[in-house]
Amino acid sequence: MFIGAMTGLPMMVAAMFTTTDYTKVMNAGFPAVELIYQATGHRELTMFLGALLILVMACTYSFLSFHVLKRY
């Protein structure tokens, strides 16, 4: 939890200062990627960071679902 707070807080502060269009973020299919795009302004970098984010989320989800299924 400590690591999440230490990485999430700077991300939240950076997003607050770099977000230019909140309506786009709220209507986006994957708002985190829209935030990254508005922060960087580069399509290629957004695709790389978005893919990295999806990979981390997929690995975490697989681990959690395996752990829950193993218990039952």
Image (tube, helix red, strand yellow):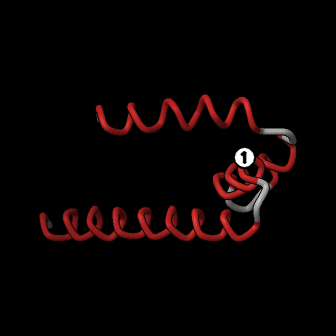
Residue 5 lies in what quarter of the image? Answer: top left
- Above/below status of 64 relative to 4: below
Q: Amino acid at mark 1?
A: Ala
Q: Where does residue 14 sit, x and y in percent of width and height?
A: 63, 34
Point out the residue furthest to the left here.
71
Name the quadrant of the N terminus.
top left
- Above/below status of 13 relative to 23: above
The mark total stands at: 1
Q: Is residue 54 left or right of residue 4?
A: right
Q: Secondary structure at mark 1?
A: helix
Mark 1, residue position: 39
For label 1, count other residues whose C-alpha is less than 10 Å away and answer few (under 14), some (14-19) or many (20+): some
| Residue positioned 29% across, 67% down in the render | 65
Q: Where does residue 26 sit, x and y in percent of width and height?
A: 78, 46
| Residue positioned 38% across, 32% down in the render | 6
Q: Is residue 8 left or right of residue 69?
A: right
| Residue positioned 85% across, 50% down in the render | 24
| Residue positioned 85% across, 39% down in the render | 20
- Above/below status of 33 relative to 21: below
Q: Where does residue 66 sit, x and y in percent of width and height?
A: 23, 70
Say which of 67 and 50 sits in front: 50
Residue 71 lies in what quarter of the image? Answer: bottom left
Name the quadrant of the C terminus.
bottom left
